[in-house]
Image: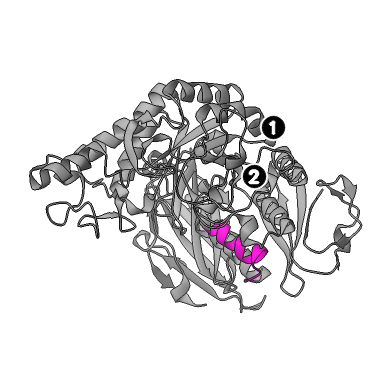
Amino acid sequence: MEKSSVHHIMNNEYCYAIDKDKILIKISLKAGDVKHVYLHYLDKYIRDKNTHKKLKMTKVASDGLLDYYEATINVHMLCVRYYFEFISANSSSNSHIHDFYGNNRFFSKEITDLSYMYDCPQPVKEEEMYIIPEWAKGAVVYEIFPDRFAPNGTPNKKWYKAPMTSHGMLGGTLKGITSKLNYIKDLGVDVIYMTPIFKSNSNHKYDTLDYFDIDPDFGTKDDLHELIDSAHAMGMKVILDGVFNHTSPDFFAFKDLIENGENSKFKDWYYPESFPIKTTGKPNFLTFAYYGGMPKLNCANKEVRDYVFNVVTYWINEFNIDGWRLDAADEVGHDFWKQLRKVVKQTKSDALLTGEIWHFTSSYISGDEWDTIMNYNFRTAVVDYIATHSISATDFVHEFEYTRGVSHAKTHQILWNLIDSHDTGRFLHCADENKTALKLAAALQMITPGMPMIYYGDEVGMTGGNDPDCRRGMLWDEEKQDLDMLKWYKTLIQIRKSHPCIIEGGRTYLTVENDTDLIIFKAFDEKEELYIILHNGENTVSVNSLKGKTNLLTNETFDGNVNDYSVYILK
């Protein structure tokens, strides 16, 4: 076996509590390199052979390079010592080749010395246990860009203009959103996420001027109360967007820095590189994306932290919001997020924290910072496979398997799986306006564990290029809506909610064919099995092994023939 590929660390990514007296341990190694992996574990302090257990580990994912194995042990110990046993895939049934691995070293014989085993203090692991909001598991998220979702009155001609420019307001309001809650609920949405609603001088509001006030373009605090209370009464959660990496240049602290320069009492709230502060040309202070209109906050500063912590608790306490989406979150340090998590969870234990990050990393989502992330890896894979056909079926599956392999078991249930957002071109635009492709992409969102995030209007066939064109006014005129697409989304969401194995069950890939672009996998739990067929290619393909099952999308009996560019959910 290729020993250099073996990876295991005694941290909260590879060894962690998932419940009282339940520890999950995982390890990764070169794909196909071993036949079996076993976990050996015993009590550190009771040197009795009866405490030594051996458990076969389960391969939960394979991304083409690495296989990921997990095992959950039921123990009640002060400290668990453990090591791994590999049985080589090259061994014959009569001559097994064993390798043992403990404390980052390989051994040719079974490990008996405790010092060569890994060490897992169970009380510490349980104290640090990753607790996610139960309501978030598998919940459907609906993203709203407030200025473009719903005005107070009937949308006018200006509302539907396209393409959209970066200037001007269309007139969407909080009251407009409240008026459309029945539509949102009927779609099957569980969580409403709104991009920033705080006072700002822009239409996107990502340059906050006042974190404690609603932008008058959108309405008042009373309007927000009405929206949240109404959504809660209908069983939906509401998440706000927090921009804590940077502010508006008109934010009180930065204005003081401009006026007083090196003598400003807010000098350490930002990152000035020289004085006086330049308000035109190339900024002489750190910013978001080198843009002088968004000066970067120094979140290592205690005064800044205290200010931000007051902001997040204010909106939870006063308006009972259900969580925060954290903008540009990977540009702020880990220590800040660790502290913010504690503040938020102490204020509302089941509030959800979602970080914006455009590449997958488990360092922020191991239980002590964010709860989850906007899963742009999901979007990239779906766009590449479904919209542009730039990767193969195998590559597509490997992208999914990588995420499953490296993510925390609990995070996997609440990843925000999106196909577009206010920062990207609409999926339909990326797919060259191919609505069949959008249907396939929507199906993938709804049959994948996690939290599918619908960007407003996708469900009625909205299109639009990159930011800002992706932020067009919502299509409310039924003559402009694709009602067949709307029905498709509703059907998919209903199936998702009626079959828990999609959200929390296991998954096994049965067929992955590059030539035909055919993927078949089984989603299962203790109560049922569903078979999902995704065909991203031309021509009809036969799958007679599943003939006779019911297609939940149409309630028709599957005849064994898979049409081109189609999806089937069979039971």
User: Is label 1 in a helix, a strand or a loop?
Assistant: helix
The region drawn magenta spans 377-391
**Nearest to N terminus: mark 1 or mark 2:** 1
Task: Tell me the residue that label 2 is attached to.
Answer: 503
**Disc 2, SS:** helix
Question: Magenta region's main secondary structure?
Answer: helix
Farthest residue in the left direction? 263
Q: Which quadrant of the view contains residue 141?
A: top right
**Who is closer to the viewer here, 62 or 377?**
377
Image location (x, y in percent) of residue 249 = 27, 44
Residue 527 can be seen, yes or no: no
User: CA gap, disc 1 to disc 2?
Assistant: 20 Å
Q: Residues within 10 Å of mark 1 (few under 14, many from 20)?
A: few
Per the rendering, the mark at residue 186 is 1
User: Which residue is pictured at 67% across the width and 75% down the height?
Assistant: 93
Percent from the top left, x then y, of residue 244?
Answer: 33, 43
The image shows residue 101 at horizontal and vertical percentages of 45, 67
Q: Amino acid at mark 2?
A: Ile
Quadrant housing residue 65 = bottom right
Residue 535, by quadrant, is bottom right
Q: Which residue is depicted at the point 62% across and 78% down?
A: 91
Identity of the residue furthest to the front in this view: 157
Q: Mark 1, mark 2: which one is toward the viewer?
A: 1
On the rendered structure, is 50 left or right of 332? right
At 23% from the left and 46% from the top, the residue drawn is 300
Q: Amino acid at mark 1?
A: Asp
The residue nearer to you, when weighing 16 against 153, is: 153
Q: Residues within 10 Å of mark 2 (few under 14, many from 20)?
A: many
Q: Is residue 493 above or below residue 441?
A: above
Residue 501 horizontal side relative to residue 104, left or right = right
